[in-house]
Amino acid sequence: MIRLLVGILVFVINTVYRDRPYPRFYVLETVARVPYFSYLSVLHLYETLGWWRQVDWLKVHFAESWNELHHLLIMEELGGGNFWLDRLLARSVALVYYWIVVALYVVAPRSAYHFMELVEGHAFQTYNKFLKANAAELKAQPAPAIAVKYYRDGDLYMFDEFQSAHAPEERRPQVDNLYDVFLAIRDDEQEHVKTMVACQRSNKAQALSPHAIEKTIEIVTAPADLSSDSQGEAIVEKI
């Protein structure tokens, strides 16, 4: 069923937007945000009912939706959503997939994460092919302002937060031209795949938030007089 859902989405996008890359990416990013909204909705429901509270999962999924939002904003700046029919199709498909993933996440969370693993894997392949076919042209064009703000000049806390395979501040993409932007988006999709795989392997007690990883720092202090009559005291502090 999961592969069928992904296959339908891929078929529609590949068929309708075969020769229109920016509208294709606009539709893809509009739909790609939706499952993270579904996860958040169900998690908030569980928290409201007092069944379960795991703030780190909420943080990670919100950061994932935040990342996809900026992919969408980039595509809008490139003109991908200019035609009303493209917007209508994207939002209609997104609405349908929202409720499908909500139901799936309630019944089988790992299957819902596997769904997004496949979607993000397709997005990675789509951007990878586009980069290989249009490298020279993309390198000659400037990076959109929204991409520069998101990847370089803005608050990068949320950018780090969705990447469970990286420590905070480890990954900082270049945004010198449009090629760099699409390269960063492609690599973002790969990081989403890794996080979705981690979600399938994790239990509810595990925190995936990169900023929430506990670090232990041992601070050892001793008195100034280190003679044999003095007794040193070691202090271990966890931060």
Image (spheres, helix red, strand yellow):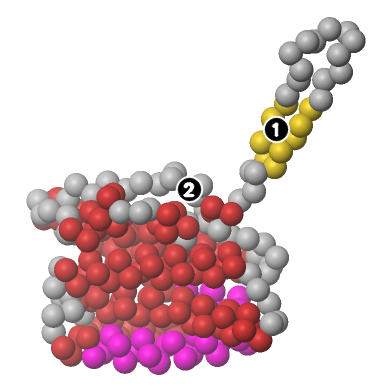
Query: From the image, which quarter does the C terminus lie in?
Result: top right
Q: Closer to the observer: label 2 or label 1? A: 1
In the foreground, 60 or 218: 218
Number of marks drawn: 2
Q: What residue type is labelled 2?
A: Pro
Taking the image as shown, residue 89 lies to the left or right of residue 141, namely right
Based on the displayed image, in which of its 4 quarters is residue 108 positioned?
Answer: bottom right
Report the residue at 65% width, 65% height from top.
Answer: 202
Q: Residue 51: x, y in percent?
A: 70, 82
Q: Considering the numbered disc 1 on the image, is that residue within a helix, a strand or a loop?
A: strand
Q: Residue 168 carries which label?
A: 2
Q: Considering the numbered disc 2 on the image, is that residue within a helix, a strand or a loop?
A: loop
In the foreground, 238 or 61: 238
Residue 132 can be seen in this image:
no
Based on the displayed image, in which of its 4 quarters is residue 234 positioned?
Answer: top right
Q: Residue 97: x, y in percent?
A: 42, 88
Does the magenta stretch mainly form a helix, a strand or a loop? helix
Report the residue at 35% width, 80% height from top.
Answer: 31
Residue 231 can be seen in this image:
yes
Q: Which mark is residue 218?
A: 1
Whether the magenta-drawn stretch holds residue 18 is answered as no
Whether the magenta-drawn stretch holds residue 112 is answered as yes
Q: Which of marks 2 and 1 is nearer the N terminus?
A: 2
Please give the range of residues in magenta: 88-117
Q: Which amino acid does label 1 sit on?
A: Glu
Q: How far is disc 2 from disc 1 in space, using C-alphas?
A: 21 Å
Q: Residue 201: x, y in percent?
A: 64, 65
